[in-house]
Image: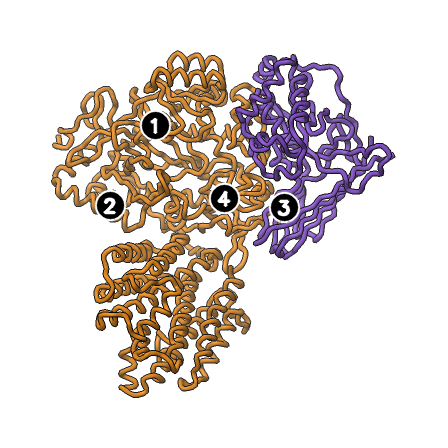
Chain colours: A orange, B purple
Amino acid sequence: MPDLIGAYRPISGIPDEMVAPDGSVRPGWIALMSALDAMGAEERISRFQHADQYLLDAGVFYRMYEGNGQGERDWPLAHIPLLISDTEWQHIETGLTQRADLLEQVIADIYSDNTFIREGLLPPELVAENPAFLRPLAGVRPMSGYHLHFCAFELGRGPDGRWWVLGDRTQAPSGAGFALENRVATTRAFSDIYSSLHVHRLASFFRDFRDSLTEMGGSGGGRVAILTPGPLNETYFEHAYIARYLGFLLVQGEDLVVVNGEVMVRTVSGLKPISVLWRRLDGDFTDPLELRQESHIGTPGLVEAVRRGTVGFVNSLGAGILETRALGAFLPAIAQARLGTDLLLPNIATWWCGSQQARDYVFQNIDTMLVGSALSNLLAIDDSQGTLDAGRLSEADREDLLARIEANPGAYVAQEAVSLSTAPVHMDGALEPRPVTLRVYAARTPQGWSIMPGGFARIGHSLDTSAIAMQRGGYAADVWVVSDKPVEQVSLLSTGKKTIERNPSGNLPSRAGDNLIWLGRYAERCEATVRILRAYHLRLAELGHSDTPLLEATRKYIEPAGVDTSEAVPDGLLAIIDGAVRSASEIRDRFSPDGWLALTDLQKTARRFKRTIKPGDDATRAMTVLLRKLAGFSGLVHENMYRFAGWRFLEIGRRLERGIQIAEIATWLCDPAAPDGAVEMLLEIGDSVMTHRRRYGYGHGKFGAIELLITDPLNPRSVMFQLTELLEQLKQLPRGYTDGQLSSPAKAALRLQTELAVIEAESVTMSMLVNAASGLAGISDLIAETYF
Amino acid sequence: MRYDIRLKLEYAYDAPVSGGRHLVRVFPITLPGIQRVIASSLDLAPQPTEHSEFADFFGSRVVSLTYRQPHDKLEIAMAARVEVTRRDATIDFSPDLAGLSAQLAANWDMSATAPHHYTGPSPRISIDPAITEYARQSLSNTRTVKEAANDLCLRIHEDFAYDGDATLVDTPVAEAFSLRRGVCQDFAHIMIAGLRGLGIPAGYVSGFLRTIPPEGKPRLEGADAMHAWVKVWCGEEAGWIEFDPTNAIRAGQDHIVIGYGRDYSDVAPIVGVLRSAGGHEASQAVDVLEVA
């Protein structure tokens, strides 16, 4: 027996996932623990860190809503996976398949004939008073014929050793993407152990579901898209991750428009049809016209499209009503009535106080009950605000609760308070038992329900069952379903097909294009600002004071943009970086994790510098560090991003901004009143000192600089160079250059380029440069008009 | 009684809107035993890009309009001829409150006319303890649910001042209640909230009201109005009975129904999503003329 297990002390009377009640160790655990034992404490910690580093690098985070404001929390991985034998898993699979089928019957009935209510199997008020019952969808048959396509189930093992369903998640279940990331992180840390145990793979589950959704879209050419509420949602990371992993479009409500009853996505190549929406927002937020009128994240007309049967939702709008806690009280009888059998995986014992008999039972056994709102869609363990553990209430509070139930019985539901089984977590070098729940996913495929062989486990940070919620410090663990035989190895990439199917390019949503341009612009604006600040602080350090005409002119130039030179890292610079991160966060699905990491690293470094760096010499060096990090970001984007339209928009943003920045600051060159040293400083900002010296020696200082920074077509820092690149990219965009016709932004770029191309350096005037800068800004507007 | 009804809704936008999508509920509907629509038509300016119709959950006739061209005003003109056949039941078949809750518990209907849709909170109406207490006073001197509803209807008329400037279309019910003033929409919402608080199912009725000019005065053009009143479930036998707290009467020959809902949000004359920067001016004119 490995030492780790030997020292492990499960809590008596509570089942444990590693150690069976008879003291024997469940299958798989010995191999895992022996391996962990053998590597020693130091190696173990370093492996855990390896997993954490992966998650950090991949940018996995979870958004917190608690307290004042909100923040991102690193994904709280409990490093040791939860092992479940595949014979036990078989039971879970069969049970959940049966349960998902029954739930489909219930939801289909609620939105059609209401036979369950007429037969007395379901009380009418649970539906009619339920805000999750979406009346505009009553009587509407879903396009696919099914309401449910993707469900999650929260399971817990009770004191009797059986698995119970703590809650059904049908609205917009989250976490499947996190399960994948858990798996990747855990296997990075324990690749040797993982491959020696026969662990069922997750990829085939996702592959099958992806294919099912594509098939559901039909042959009409309509695409599948994931509909997200946007980057402020707590699980936005996952939406972007799944979209990237499965190759689906990620859209927000404002990207969609309903035309003649059909859903279209606004892309840079015009409107494209969408026929399946995998929604990650609550159904009532999807259409401000027919559903929740105050929703700002919906698309008017979506319900009309559903009514016409032109779009299918995963899951159907209105399916969230199945999450109603009181429904659990009626599922056993519904199963008996419809299936003629008990549920293989029953939900935790539930009583709806609206029925006299149930209420009497609850009152007699109140000490063992969790009491909450009948229509709540939260799991009791996740609902610290609304659910009371009656056994822990004071005498007076309990009497008060009973009086409230008596006054409005239909509003309350009670569930048996059960202790959950424990699983080992690694704490301070040893294993400790902690309560655990399991989240399991089911996806509809043409062959029936497919159950993800794994999922993820939530583990409490203390022995208190209510501390399991991740919002309150709980952990997440990978779940390994282990077999005693080798398992099928699969990846998402199929190998069997003869012909290559390509996703069409040019389906870049307009909003994504807009954000890519702004990302490019912010990144470039950041570079220009950092270069100016570096040149400023270098001179400040040399002189020891800032009282020179050149530095004063620099301050005058840069301070209106909110960049205060008295600070080494001004707020204005941080705001520019934040702008870049904000734009990037809107398009996480189109962005490599490395690019994202480079950008957030820049943000973190700048914020750290803000606290530590002093103006002058110190700041000069800090700006050099920031420049290097920016170059890293640009390099990743330039070298690694496929030349889809997305990259072009990013590039266009960079060229526009660089052109504007250089043209604006270079007006100094044409100003007879420019301060001493301006030419040298500009060449430095324009990164062209060496070229200037090589080409012009020490003569022609000013005109050489004008030529180099303005009209030279070969200097990647010149205005001319930006215009040439810009024109090239604009031509390559959809409708950029068709049948010999240039798009209006391309025409504008050609006009500006031609004006500069025919001019000698000596005749460049300030007003020409001002015109060039405003001309570039005008192109930005033309792009927005044409493509967004 | 036959009426010709004309409604004109006009919206003038501060700045041209680039498009928009609206759901319009302005047509009267045929309701057996209450009213019959003989003919109806709708004129729109400008012409919408898309135009379709459907019946919503509660049976209202909904016109869906989509504009994709820029426009700076929207005019909706509805005309209908309706025969009103409503008779007021003289005998009170309704039970007392306890009898009503027993009947409600034994009712397993989920159709649009089922009382269960009208018992709980709805988007615009929450159960408010103060309003419930106010409504409860109507139980003390009455025996049946119908009497109680009638009493509440009269009391709201008595205790509240009609004041078109006191509230806006989205003023919360609790606020109108504490102001003790408002318009037909506020009075209907207050009465509904009070009845639901007592456990009596109650819904919102949107419609038209014919106004009769004072003796010897000519009828003024456009003087009628869109109106709102309340329907109350008075038990299995008595069914739904409609009360008009603004006028302290039961709905009668002068009330023409557009539709029913849990509150204003279910039957608002126009719900819209505009792509616009500025605000807008709205006006409405209604004529309800008796046809000889």
Label 3's element? strand
Label 1's element? helix
Q: Is residue A602 above or below residue A146?
A: below
Identify residue type, mark 2.
Asp
CB under 8 Å between discs 4 and 2: no
Q: CA distance from mark 1 to mark 4?
A: 29 Å
Residue A634 in view in this figure? yes
Chain at numbered mark 3: B
Identify residue type, mark 1.
His
Q: CA distance from mark 1 to mark 2?
A: 32 Å
Residue A440 image offset from top left, x and y in percent: 36, 34
Q: Which mark is residue A52?
A: 2
Q: Which mark is residue B22?
A: 3
Nearest the eye: A469 or A435: A469
Q: Is residue B84 above or below residue B68?
A: above
Q: How many other residues sit within 10 Å of disc 2, few (<14), some (14-19) or many (≥20)?
A: many
Work out whether disc 3 and disc 4 sit on a shared chain. Answer: no
Q: As drawn, which residue projects farthest toward the bottom?
A: A699
Q: How many other residues sit within 10 Å of disc 4, few (<14), some (14-19) or many (≥20)?
A: many
Q: Is residue B233 above or below residue A289?
A: above
